[in-house]
Image (tube, grey):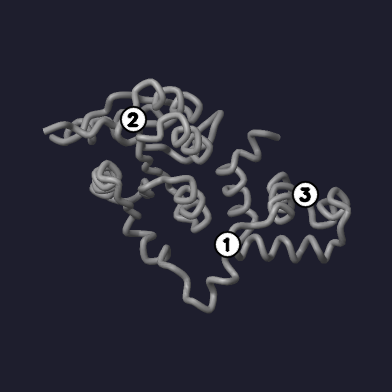
């Protein structure tokens, strides 16, 4: 039986080696490459064309989200499984939007990751059991209000992530403070963010803070 060829991208070596032992211990899987950051993950995926790439979301240089985009472009035959400690709805939406087939929480049982890898190799989706219930489609009366944030809402969130106050954002974008508050509220509602920490996490996911 042909083994599922897996690329592991995780910046903590101890964690990466533990995952490698877990995956290599399966009769139907084999780790064919490793990467310690997002940029190297894209390069390794292009070089090795693995069946599945397991990506830690929080990696140096290039975030897991940006790496996922790069892999989908340079190695389109590689399925992506996101691995993270964050269960935020915004993370799930963003990773699925760029084509990830799996989303697994680090704090879950190891069997969740193995299931996700096998499902992704078959071209199927797998959401961690800890977040699957919250990822169900919204009721019909709410779907019209959900969706991607606008460019202006994104600008407001980005400035917020850098620590700017509503007044600072208003001056920077040359809009009213009340308008800033509306954009902030709408963006956070759409993305399922509940506070500044969530906004910062989302900014890291998008690579905004790295650009700054």
Residue that mark 2 sits on: 7
Res 48 → quadrant: top left
**Left or right: 156 with respect to 191?**
right
The C terminus sits in image quarter:
top right
Residue furthest bottom in the image: 141
Mark 3, Cα crowd under 10 Å, few <14 / some 14-19 / many 20+, is some
Q: Are marks 1 and 2 in contact (CB under 8 Å)?
A: no
Residue beneath label 3, please? Answer: 164
Name the element at disc 3: loop
Task: Quote the CA–CA distance across marks 2 and 3.
Answer: 38 Å
Q: Earlier in the sequence, mark 2 or mark 3?
A: 2
Nearer to us of marks 1 and 2 is 1
Q: What residue is shown at x 49% (from left), y 50% (from top)?
A: 97
| Residues packed near mark 2 inside 10 Å, few (<14), some (14 to 19) or many (20 plus) | many
Task: Kindly identify the residue that appears in the image at 16 percent across and 36 percent down.
Answer: 28
Residue 147: which numbered mark, if any?
Answer: 1
Mark sitting on residue 197: none
> In this view of the protein, which residue sits in the foreground, 186 or 161?
186
Q: Is residue 173 left or right of residue 205?
A: right
Q: Secondary structure at mark 2?
A: strand
First along the sequence among labels 1 and 2: 2
Task: State the residue at coordinates (79%, 54%).
Answer: 165
Indicate the position of residue 98 as horizontal and vertical percent values: 48, 45
Please state which of the two labelled residues, at mark 2 or mark 3, is closer to the viewer: 2
Which of label 1 and label 3 is nearer to you? Answer: 1
Outermost residue, top direction?
Answer: 47
State which quadrant residue 1 falls in.
top left
The image shows residue 39, relative to residue 96, as above or below, that is above
Question: Toward the viewer: 199 or 69?
Answer: 69
Q: Position of residue 145 (x, y in %)?
A: 60, 70
């Amino acid at each position: 039986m042909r083994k599922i060829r897996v690329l592991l991208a995780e910046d903590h070596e101890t964690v990466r080696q533990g995952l490698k032992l877990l995956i290599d211990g399966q009769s139907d899987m084999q780790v064919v490459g490793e990467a310690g950051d997002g940029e190297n993950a894209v390069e390794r995926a292009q070089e090795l064309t693995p069946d599945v790439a397991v990506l830690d979301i929080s990696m140096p240089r290039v975030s897991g989200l940006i790496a996922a985009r790069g892999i989908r472009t340079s190695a389109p035959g590689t399925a992506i499984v996101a691995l993270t400690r964050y269960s935020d709805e915004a993370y799930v939406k963003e990773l699925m939007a760029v084509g990830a087939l799996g989303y697994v929480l680090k704090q879950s049982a190891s069997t969740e990751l193995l299931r996700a890898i096998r499902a992704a190799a078959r071209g199927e989706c797998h959401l961690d059991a800890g977040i699957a219930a919250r990822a169900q489609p919204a009721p019909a009366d709410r779907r019209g209000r959900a969706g991607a944030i606008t460019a202006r809402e994104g600008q407001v969130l980005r400035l917020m992530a850098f620590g700017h106050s509503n007044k600072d954002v208003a001056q920077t974008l040359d809009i009213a403070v009340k308008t800033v508050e509306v954009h902030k509220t709408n963006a956070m509602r759409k993305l399922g963010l509940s506070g500044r920490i969530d906004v910062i996490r989302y900014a890291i996911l998008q690579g905004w803070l790295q650009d700054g």
